[in-house]
Image: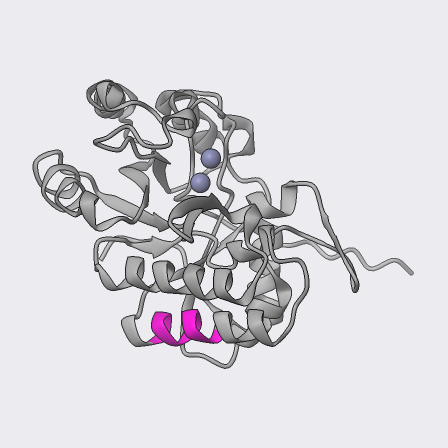
Amino acid sequence: MVIKIIYPLLHMNNFHTHTWRCKHATGTVKDYVDAAVKNKMKILGMSDHTPLPDNRWSHVRMDMSELDAYVEEFKEAKTEELILLKGLECEWDPIYENFYRDELLGERNFDFLVGSVHYIKNSGDWGYLSEIRTAKHLANYAEILITTMRTGLFSFIAHPDGFGAGYKEWDSNTEACSIDILTAAEELSIPLEINGYGLRKNKISTSEGDRSVYPLLKFWELASGFNITAICNSDAHRPEDISASIKESKEIADRFNIKLIDDIRI
Ligand SMILES: [Zn+2]
Ligand SMILES: [Zn+2]
């Protein structure tokens, strides 16, 4: 006899989404709202890559001159059918503190900011996550991620296990880096994201076989020993990915008994 298991229709929200403005995604805020309504989401958090006052890394984010238009999009996309939160995904550098605190969360009234590390400073120059190779690089990554958490500006930390994009093997170095991150997350009570986009990217081959860029199962297994919370997001770069991989991300949380949150409003 075949037993058919019918899963209840899980309602899921998503707080990590990008628009065409970042130059590597598609869709407007309104397109995402329509997709989220179709998927019966109750809360949609838009978090396109923030512009930076000096237009640093502008090849993967909107320019400062577009911020007004991004903000305007939220007025047009507002609907009774879900709660729409206005956010941005940010990289930490102390020179941006006033911009994040006073302009975005202050004057411009953003609902939330996501803390993210895509670049780390190795020997003076900024390098991308995929260039992480050594114990020192991992220590640099943990340091900037923990500093990001400590600012108190960010509602959650995106892909905290992003170092796996560069550092292929799991060893005592990745374990030490992960323990530092998890210890800080517990101390600061800041949610960590189980990022669905990493599940959709090309796999990375390691001596233990192929694995996702992130989430790293070993990271989340370690996380089960800490009193932390996690949030599952699709990190959609196309409206049609509005709920992509969220179910699989939740399965990782379940597997390691990680407490989940599904709302970032305090
Ligand atoms: Zn992106
Ligand atoms: Zn993102």
In this rendered view, identify the residue nearer to me: 228 or 163.
163
197 is higher (above) or lower (below) than 166: above
User: In terms of secondary structure, what is the magenta stretch mainly?
Assistant: helix
Where on the picture, by quarter, is residue 201? top right
Q: How far from the left and from the top, in percent, is residue 124? A: 37, 49
Is residue 157 shown left or right of residue 207? left
Is residue 70 shown left or right of residue 169? left
Q: How far from the left and from the top, in percent, is residue 246? A: 55, 48
**Is residue 117 covered in magenta?**
no
In this rendered view, identify the residue nearer to me: 32 or 27.
27
Q: How far from the left and from the top, in percent, is residue 166? A: 60, 52
As drawn, the residue found furthest toward the bottom would be 225
Q: How far from the left and from the top, in percent, is residue 98? A: 12, 44
Quarter of the image for the C terminus: give it: bottom left
- Which residue is rendered at x = 48% and y = 41% of the image? 235
Task: State whether residue 121 appears in this view.
Answer: yes
Quarter of the image for the N terminus: give it: bottom right
Task: State whether residue 9 appears in this view.
Answer: no
- Which residue is rendered at x = 44% and y = 59% of the image? 141
Count of all numbered marks drawn on residues in the image: 0
156 is higher (above) or lower (below) than 234: below
16 is higher (above) or lower (below) than 120: above
Is residue 217 shown left or right of residue 59? right
**Which residues fall within the magenta stretch?**
179-186
- Which residue is rendered at x = 49% and y = 65% of the image? 136
